[in-house]
Image (cartoon, rainbow, N blue to C red):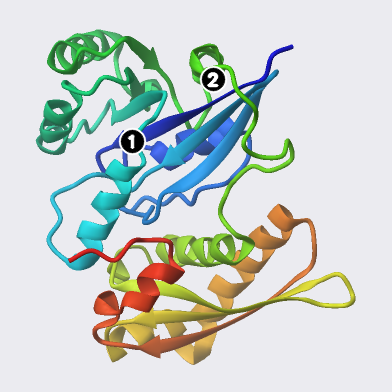
Amino acid sequence: MTEKCGLVAVIGAPNAGKSTLVNALVGQKVAITSAKAQTTRARLMGIALKDDVQIILADTPGIFAPRRRLDRAMVAAAWEGAQEADAILLVVDAVKQRRHELEPLLETLKDRSERKLLVLNKVDASAKEPLLALAEDLTGKAAFDEVFFVSALSRDGVPELKQRLAELMPEGPWHYPEEQVSDASERLLACEITREQLYQQLHDELPYDTAVRPESYTQRKDGSVEVRQQIVVARDSQKAIVLGKRGAKIRAIGEAARKELAEILGQKVHLFLHVKVEENWAEARDIYEEIGLDWVK
């Protein structure tokens, strides 16, 4: 059989379910998810296989109106993910829709030459008639080639979408080994998992002014891995939130992240976390490089 390989850019407004969809297409977790918008910061490649086809998925940050340098870097990463793609998936939350953020996206997409697929997500929580009206309305604004109705969380409709993406990929050699599911380094993946736990366990208590920096990632002789990370916050009050009473919260975050990382890596993990206050960390060029974003002015 002839090998096929292509790039699919996954874009959309914040919290539309892009990372959950990428995980569902790959068949395992490669991108972090959270109920908070803008969880994904750097462009992360998920690698899905369908028979003799390798589908490289660029999971992009949600595209929104950027204000800070970090915001601008995230949006730049999102549009970079769409460059020279063999297909673009616009993922839309069929329930919340976020029309104010969708409209600029549709305006930009309508003139792009790549094959465009509209993916209405979370359809299990929406009535059928409004879904059809939404699909017709959005297709009229950006001339989508095809429309898919899915629930990334329950995976309804995902196999059909994956099959169609495989059909659209061009002939060519695979870019990654068969067993590889992401281009993220294990160091970066470990940081992303810790950051996900920060958001899941602290909910609205913690703003997005946080980063997780890798300090060391060492394979031990006994087959386990030792991971040391620094959680960076902007204020002392945020440090207190992350630590929790007598350090209870950071221990819970570390334990949950350690278990998940061990499951993904298939080896025992020793995870060590500490918190640092750095008021202007979002202006530090080296942090951008560490979390996989380009420095933007």
Q: Measuring 39% from the left and 55% from the top, which residue is drawn there?
A: 42
Residue 22 drawn above or below residue 265: above
Type of the residue with mark 1:
Ala
Residue 279 drawn above or below residue 55: below
Mark earlier in primary sequence (2, 1): 1
Density class for disc 2 (Cα within 10 Å; few <14, some 14-19, many ≥20) is: some
- Residue situated furthest front in the rendering: 172
* Residue 240 rendering spot, x and y as whole percentages: 37, 87
| Tag nearer the camera, 2 or 1 | 1
Q: Give the number of the disc on residue 82.
A: 1
Q: Measuring 37% from the left and 27% from the top, which residue is drawn there?
A: 122
Q: Give the number of the disc on residue 227.
A: none
User: 143 or 244: nearer the eye?
Assistant: 143
Q: Is residue 131 visible?
A: yes
Quadrant showing the N terminus = top right
SS type, badge 1: loop
Type of the residue with mark 2:
Lys
In the displayed structure, does residue 293 sit left or right of residue 279? right
SS type, badge 2: helix
In the displayed structure, does residue 137 sit left or right of residue 56? left
In the displayed structure, does residue 183 sit left or right of residue 168? right
Q: Is residue 37 visible?
A: no
- Residue situated furthest right in the rendering: 222
Q: Quadrant of residue 267?
A: bottom right
* Residue 5 rendering spot, x and y as whole percentages: 58, 25
User: 165 or 170: nearer the eye?
Assistant: 170
The residue that label 2 is drawn on is 162
